[in-house]
Amino acid sequence: MKIIFFVNILLLTCFTGIAQSADSTWNHKKCAVVLTYDDAIAQHLDNAIPLLDSLQLKATFYITVNGAKDRINDWKKAAANGHELGNHTLYHPCMGGKGREWVNRNYDLNYYTVQRMVDEIKMTSIFLEALDGKKERTFAYTCGDMKVNDTAFMDLLKNDFVAARGVYPQMDSVMQANRYNINCYGVNGHSATEMKEWVKKAMDTHSLLVILFHGVGGGNGLNVSLNDHRELLNFLQQNQQQIWIAPMIDVAKFIKMKQEQKK
């Protein structure tokens, strides 16, 4: 009986250690959640940021200069309140073509050179530094497009960015995450229930969940309602003991540290 008792104690200790290790994967939490908002639209300033601030949650706003130029002081205030201003290019260029007839030819990547793309991205970082005084930054691919004329332009910019966010809907572990193509779940009319299921899955699998918002109560065809957005953020705030909620820059630096420790 004593042998069985000690074996059970040993097994319990092992399983407890595994659980504690898994729970501490993300800055001593079960998972990490990064809230990202693209395109510097007015509803981010008017609807998203006041709610985030009221709940003391910090997010990443991927800024296009063309979108931010009319409310520069408001974006400065957002940065001063601890939100990350990420680079989302000067004019949001995308690959035009079938299904993307809305792309302005002047900002169609089919007509860009790699150098033009790199120059515009670097200029955006200069603009953002003028707003927040920071040099470390993350990037988000416009429309998820990563190439100009078959050239992966981020290969020329890795010294400029800690990480870059893509658009593929997948959750990754610390060691699986590709810092220059971080996956995310895009919101397009999703309910709070659906989004909370993403969070619960991240907790269960000890993964990174990045959520991408465009419209928040309007401002873009890819929209989330104010009620669903509020319910999700309240859920995150209520579960902060288990969820690490932080801007992309902080999570990306954590991933870099963990991955370098394993080399």
Image (cartoon, helix red, strand yellow):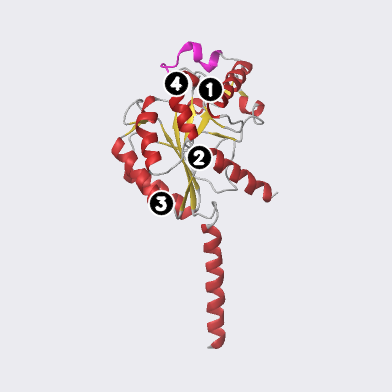
Q: Which residue is mark 3?
A: 200
Residues tagged 1 and 2 counted as in contact (Cβ below 8 A): no
Q: Is residue 137 left or right of residue 199?
A: right
Residues tagged 4 and 3 counted as in contact (Cβ below 8 A): no
In this view of the protein, which residue sits in the foreground, 98 or 1?
A: 1
- Whether residue 200 is in magenta: the answer is no
- At 43% from the left and 43% from the top, the residue drawn is 57
Percent from the top left, x then y, of residue 193?
Answer: 32, 46
Q: Secondary structure at mark 4?
A: helix
The part of the chain drawn in magenta is 100-111
Residues tagged 2 and 3 counted as in contact (Cβ below 8 A): no
First-in-chain label (2 vs 3): 3
Residue 236 visible from this viewpoint: yes
Q: Which residue is mark 1?
A: 89
Q: Secondary structure at mark 3?
A: helix
Q: Which residue is mark 2?
A: 247
Q: Which residue is mark 4?
A: 67
